[in-house]
Image (cartoon, rainbow, N blue to C red):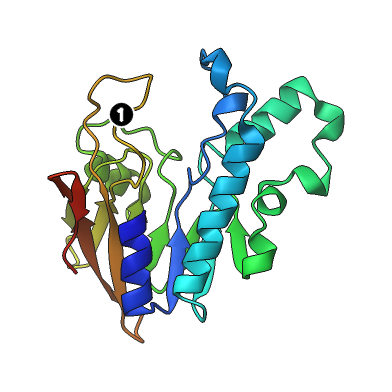
């Protein structure tokens, strides 16, 4: 994440896109939880909001977007099943809890596909893929240009129709720690992506791999 902030500060991008699962909502998940962490949701929200604010400071003039991931949906699912009467409170919406309005960030619901130019943005949970060749499976389903995360690894697939129309799907890595308590040595990739757009809406995606060596992390852009 520190590298993301450093790159944003250097490049001053026109658009910042947070593609979901930015806050884990571990405490309201349906999985078995460590009792020591069950009551830390407010601390997690505060830490996440602080880092979103740091991203805004790194690129103060950028258009900022936040795509809801399946982990943010954990809160909605919890409210619907455990506290339905509270589910309509504006103060319990993710965009309010993370202070997105304070940083001028637009919130996009998970089930609403979003598009910049000719590139669709999905979180990635919308299409069941598994961890093997997720880009190929997403491209086969959406049949259009798409970038997504969710699987926490880099992958790409291309397709060309008989009429010559080409499409590409990119799966992008994660800035999450690669040592989750629920999985031993997951096959995840640290990284993020840079997207350059032409006025026509065509684009070029550069995956940015993050390397760890000697206790430090590195990336090249």
122 sits to left or right of 217: right
Q: Quadrant of residue 206?
A: bottom left
Which residue corresponds to the image point at 65% horizontal and 25% vertical from the top-left? 39
Q: Quadrant of the C terminus?
A: bottom left
Which residue corresponds to the image point at 72% horizontal and 46% vertical from the top-left? 93
Q: Is residue 117 above or below residue 200?
A: above
Q: Circle 1 sits in a helix, a strand or a loop, which is it?
A: loop
Which one is nearer the viewer's eye here, 80 or 15? Answer: 15
The total number of labels drawn is 1
| Residue 45 image offset from top left, x and y in percent | 61, 43
Check the image and name the residue furthest to the right. Answer: 85
Q: Quadrant of residue 10?
A: bottom left
| Residue 192 image offset from top left, x and y in percent | 30, 56
Check the image and name the residue furthest to the left. Answer: 213
Q: Is residue 177 above or below residue 205?
A: above
Check the image and name the residue furthest to the bottom. Answer: 199
Q: Quadrant of residue 15?
A: bottom left
Examine the rendering and report whether any part of residue 144 can be seen: no
| Residue underneath mark 1 | 179
């Amino acid at each position: 994440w520190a590298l993301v902030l450093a790159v944003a500060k250097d490049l001053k991008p026109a658009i910042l896109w947070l593609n979901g699962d930015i806050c884990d909502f571990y405490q309201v998940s349906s999985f078995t939880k460590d009792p020591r962490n069950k009551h830390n949701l407010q601390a997690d929200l505060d830490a996440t909001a602080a880092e979103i604010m740091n991203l805004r400071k790194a690129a103060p003039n950028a258009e900022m977007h936040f795509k809801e991931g399946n982990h943010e949906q954990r809160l909605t699912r919890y409210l619907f099943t455990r506290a339905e009467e509270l589910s309509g409170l504006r103060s319990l919406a993710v965009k309010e809890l993370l202070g997105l309005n304070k940083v001028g960030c637009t919130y996009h619901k998970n089930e609403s596909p979003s598009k910049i130019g000719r590139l669709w943005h999905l979180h990635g949970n919308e299409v069941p893929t598994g961890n093997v060749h997720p880009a190929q499976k997403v491209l086969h389903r959406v049949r259009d240009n798409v970038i997504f995360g969710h699987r926490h690894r880099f992958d790409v697939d291309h397709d060309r129709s008989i009429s010559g129309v080409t499409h590409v799907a990119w799966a992008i890595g994660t800035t999450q720690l690669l040592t989750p308590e629920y999985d031993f040595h997951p096959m995840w990739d640290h990284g993020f992506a840079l997207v350059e757009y032409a006025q026509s809406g065509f684009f070029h995606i550069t995956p940015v791999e993050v390397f760890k060596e000697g206790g430090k992390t590195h990336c090249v852009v």
